[in-house]
Image (cartoon, rainbow, N blue to C red):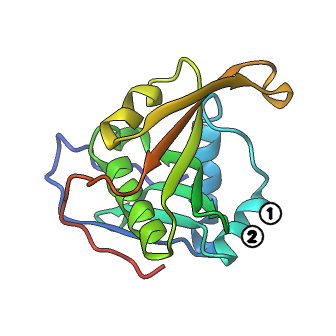
């Protein structure tokens, strides 16, 4: 797990960057997945390694420390699917997720995608977050692999404008 971060109340934000993950980020990604185990599905470390090698995980950094990650994949049908989103507990509601999603959407648009899609388990606070970014709920369903828990599917047409914030944009 990463060292304790200075809480936003204790010190102002000095800088935030979003970049592609490297294999040195794997311990952070695994720790965040474990910290959010009730909210995100489990993926083995080897899967994260493959995603990192393919450029399918981004990392947000706050003052030089990892603050969150998003794993994602694209398809030939103009769709980018967000697989997992995790933000360090100390930085919730500090726009880390918003900044990472803006980068994912910019990447998707620059690669010809027109839709971003994700699923979120029913009953999680994150279901209140997605509409603030312009996502629309497009389905509710259960899969056998989720122990019949309901999943909410969220979709966004990428023509919508995401509120602009000043952050460094990585080359993906």
Q: How many C-alpha atoms fall within 10 Å of the one at disc 2: few (<14), some, or many (≥20)? A: few
Q: Is residue 77 above or below residue 154?
A: below
Give the residue pinned by disc 1. 46
Residue nearest the viewer, comparing 6 with 71 = 71
Q: Position of residue 25 (x, y in %)?
A: 57, 67
Q: Position of residue 92 (x, y in %)?
A: 35, 38
Task: Please tell me in which quadrant of the rendered image residue 45 appears.
Answer: bottom right
Horizontal and vertical percent position of residue 10: 17, 44
Q: Residue at x 51, y 23 (%)?
A: 124
Circles 2, 1 touching at the beta carbon (< 8 Å) = yes
Name the residue beneath numbered marker 2.
50
Q: Nearer the viewer, residue 85 or 106?
A: 106
82 horizontally vs 12: left or right: right
Q: Residue furthest bottom?
A: 171
Residue most extreme to the left: 12
Q: Is residue 19 above or below residue 2?
A: below
Badge 1 element: helix
Kindly state the secondary structure of the residue where label 2 is placed: helix
Dot in front, 2 or 1: 2
Q: Quadrant of residue 49?
A: bottom right
């Amino acid at each position: 797990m990463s060292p304790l971060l200075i809480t936003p109340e204790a010190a102002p934000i000095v800088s935030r960057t979003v970049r592609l993950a490297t294999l040195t980020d794997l311990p952070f990604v695994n720790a965040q997945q474990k910290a959010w185990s009730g909210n995100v599905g489990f993926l083995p470390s080897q899967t994260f390694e493959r995603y990192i090698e393919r450029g399918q995980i981004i990392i947000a950094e706050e003052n030089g420390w990892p603050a969150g990650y998003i794993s994602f994949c694209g398809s030939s049908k103009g769709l980018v699917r967000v697989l997992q989103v995790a933000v360090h507990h100390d930085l919730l509601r500090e726009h880390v997720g918003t900044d990472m999603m803006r980068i994912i959407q910019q990447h998707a648009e620059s690669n010809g995608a027109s839709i971003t899609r994700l699923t979120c388990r029913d009953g999680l606070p994150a279901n209140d977050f997605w509409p603030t970014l312009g996502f629309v709920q497009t389905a509710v369903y259960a899969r056998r692999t989720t122990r019949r828990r309901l999943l909410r599917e969220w979709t966004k047409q990428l023509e919508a404008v995401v509120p602009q914030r000043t952050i460094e944009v990585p080359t993906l």
